Amino acid sequence: MTFYGFAQGMGVLAFLVGITMFFNRNDRRFKQQLATYSAIIGTHYFLMGAHSGAISAWLSAIRTLAALRTRNVWVMWLFIALTLGLGLGNAHHLMEVLPICGTAASTWALFRTAGLTTRCVMWCSTCCWVAHNIWLGSIGGSLIEGSFLLMNGINIIRFYRLQRRGIDPFKVEKALKQEEGAAAPSGKAG
């Protein structure tokens, strides 16, 4: 097996890990698998010579794990600064700026938005990654990000239609956040 074949094999492995994420119903396990996918695809990009894409993917993996524990705005800004600083510092072509922008946008969405807004920002971020992966010649990366683009796009349309009919597709998610907010200590002395 050639080095190029090995690098493409890592992309295919990332595709398999990424595509099976959608079978996970548990949000925590889904995000853990997303972090694993990001780490593997980052290794694929590194082997393909796309260092800014690798850095963006590895930061996405760490960011996703951090977002399991906090939605603190300072943590968000730290990851955006790291993505911009490390990613732009390693970009050698204009196309390498796309995953950096996509990662920064998805970081903002992960920490500051919810529901349909999150999915729309993530869809735009995925567009950046699809264009980058096609330019790079990444077979596994193009397949997985193309799949994400299609699946998320279909869900955005479906959720938007539900909202237009007066049905809130994110009702369960909102109720859980309200329960978590009510259960958290207020920090006031009683």
Image: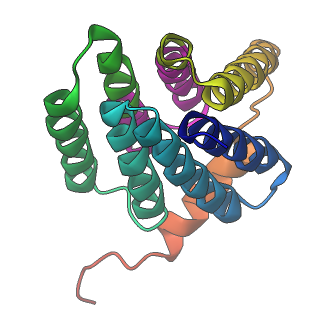
* Dominant secondary-structure state across the stretch colored magenta: helix
Quarter of the image for residue 180 reads bottom right
Work out whether 138 lies above or below 134.
below
Please name whichever residue, 105 or 61, is drawn nearer the observer in this view of the structure: 61
- Image coordinates for residue 40, horizontal then vertical, percent: 56, 51
Colour logic: rainbow
Drawn side of residue 90 relative to residue 185, left or right? left
Drawn side of residue 50 relative to residue 84, left or right? right
Please name whichever residue, 9 or 36, is drawn nearer the observer in this view of the structure: 9
Query: Residue at left 81%, top 48%?
Result: 20
Drawn side of residue 125 relative to residue 81, left or right? right
Query: Residue at left 46%, top 32%?
Result: 48
Quarter of the image for residue 176 reads bottom right
Work out whether 23 lies above or below 144.
below
The quarter in which the N terminus is drawn is top right
Q: Is residue 39 magenta?
A: no
Q: Which residues are magenta?
A: 104-130
The quarter in which the C terminus is drawn is bottom left
- Image coordinates for residue 51, horizontal then vertical, percent: 32, 35
Work out whether 134 lies above or below 31.
above
- Image coordinates for residue 32, horizontal then vertical, percent: 60, 62
- The single residue placed furthest to the bottom in the displayed view is 190
Query: Residue at left 18%, top 40%?
Result: 86
- The single residue placed furthest to the front in the displayed view is 1
Please name whichever residue, 117 or 27, is drawn nearer the observer in this view of the structure: 27
Q: Is residue 119 magenta?
A: yes
Query: Residue at left 60%, top 50%?
Result: 37
| Numbered label tally | 0
Quarter of the image for residue 148 reads top right
- Image coordinates for residue 88, horizontal then vertical, percent: 18, 28
Drawn side of residue 162 relative to residue 120, left or right? right
Please name whichever residue, 165 or 113, is drawn nearer the observer in this view of the structure: 113
